[in-house]
Amino acid sequence: MVLVNTDIIDVFLHPKSVAVIGASKKLTKGGFRIVTNLITNNFKGKVHLVNPNAEGKLYNLEFKKSILDVEDDVEIAIFYIPNRFIPDILKDCIKKGVKGAIIEASGFEEVGEKGIELKNKIIEITENFSKIRIVGPNCMGLSTINGDSDGEEKEGFFSGFGVFSSFKRGNIAIISQSGMLNGGYLMHVMTKYPNLGFRYACSIGNKMDLSEIEFLEYLIKDNTVNVIAIYLESFKNSRKFIELCRKVRSMPNKTIILLRGGITPQGQKASLSHTGSLAENSRLINGIIKQSGVIYANSFYELFQFARTFSIIYETGKILPKKGNVSFVAGSGGAGTITADLTMKYGLNYPILGDKAYDALVDVFPDWMPPNKFAFIDIWPAMEKAMMNKVRPDVVTTHVYKTLLSEPNIEGIFNMMFCSRQFRALNDLDQIVDNVKHSSKPIFFWLVGEEKEVRRVSKLLGEHNLPDFPSLEEMVKNFSILVQESNNKF
């Protein structure tokens, strides 16, 4: 019996037993790293090691010469072996009753005629994948992070790229034709943003059998996933892709972000050599993106930056802004001017403050420099007045934040924060966090100043799910995608 799409994806992501074909004791081998990730990250199913050339044990697990020598049932076989050995071992997997295979080897459509012949041989052996389902080839496998959201109880079902040890569960799922997104780049993001959690990373490679469609169908139904980040070099079924993405538009707690590679003639040549993806007309690609209503990213950096932003918004229960009305709290008129230009560029605006909010700000500003009528707040004059009157600076910031957060016409706040040990007293972080973290409005920070102090402040903000950005433009752009998504929802 062939399992329906979502059933087989559940088996791949939550298998009760796996066999690592090509398991190895050698630290430099991918087969060693796969086994290490399974064992050290507490994979709860059974793990079986298969390698005809290996002897003894690894992690107290005995090597088997063939998958047919494994006494227990095996649900998923992970192949980390040269492609020429795959057909015969697939035959053994079918005899064993294995439900799915993850083929990480390359050397298929992307290398031309010989690779296509190998693909056709696998199609014949599997009877067009009716006897066993396949993820890949030319991929970096699948990763599932189970357990508690604080990361204390984890389960890494990781690729052969590297050994993963520092990560936590979150609400982001990845579907990618590039193995890098379940390898080096995932490792980079996990270490750069240690408070950012992931649920799944699905490297689908050449999509010989299972594709983005089956994984997307599954992730849409998974309530633990709020953000789906996708990198594709081709669409397996563009109509179905559009249909699934439009379905997500009616769901208040899910967002899809897409990065599409191979949209130029040169990019198409690269994708053909990478995953064997055939060229698609750029106008067709643009049409699919527009009809699907996804958030579109222009780079891997944007893909994960946007995913991080939406992850935090859903994690903290923030309300997506609809009108794009923001306020900017800064200690620099120049930063306010640049940000005002950027808000126009990205379709946002500083609204006029209501009388109640404006009068509340007047109370803390000096007569010689009253606040603006619109929602750009250069807070420095108010700080100077407070210091002259021997009033603690945090009293002023608390007053300003509470005023802006209670203003109904403001949907979110941008903050420029100068980070320096010398001026820590002006930025009472605990007080600022307490002021804003419970608000239903998104609060974004741009940190500038001493690099060491910027890292310290960024770390503290991250612990409270308050995002900071490396530039004013990144801050504004990431707020604008929230507005875009809010207006995309049916």
Image (spheres, rainbow, N blue to C red):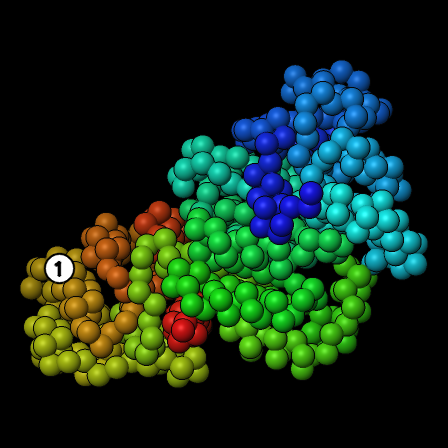
Query: Left of 58 or right of it: where is 459?
Result: left
Left or right position of 47 against 415:
right
Residue 455: image location, x then y, percent: 41, 51
Q: Residue 99: in sight, yes or no? A: yes
* 119 lies left or right of 135: right
46 lies above or below 398:
above
Q: Nearer the viewer, residue 439 or 102?
A: 102
- Nearer to us in this view, 169 or 331: 169
State whether residue 42 is above or below residue 139: above
Q: Quadrant of residue 77?
A: top right
Q: Residues within 10 Å of mark 1 (few under 14, many from 20)?
A: some
Identify the residue shown where x is 32% and y is 78%.
323
Give coordinates of residue 61: x percent, y percent.
68, 19
Count numbered badges in the picture: 1
Q: Along the line of sight, which residue is nearer the eye, 33 or 208?
A: 208
Seen from the viewer's position, the closer of residues 435 and 337 is 435
Pinpoint residue 414: horizontal percent, then vertical percent. Answer: 32, 68
Query: Could you say where residue 322 lies in the image, as x and y percent from the top left?
Result: 33, 75
- Which residue corresponds to mark 1? 395
Residue type pointed to by label 1: Val
Quadrant showing the N terminus:
top right
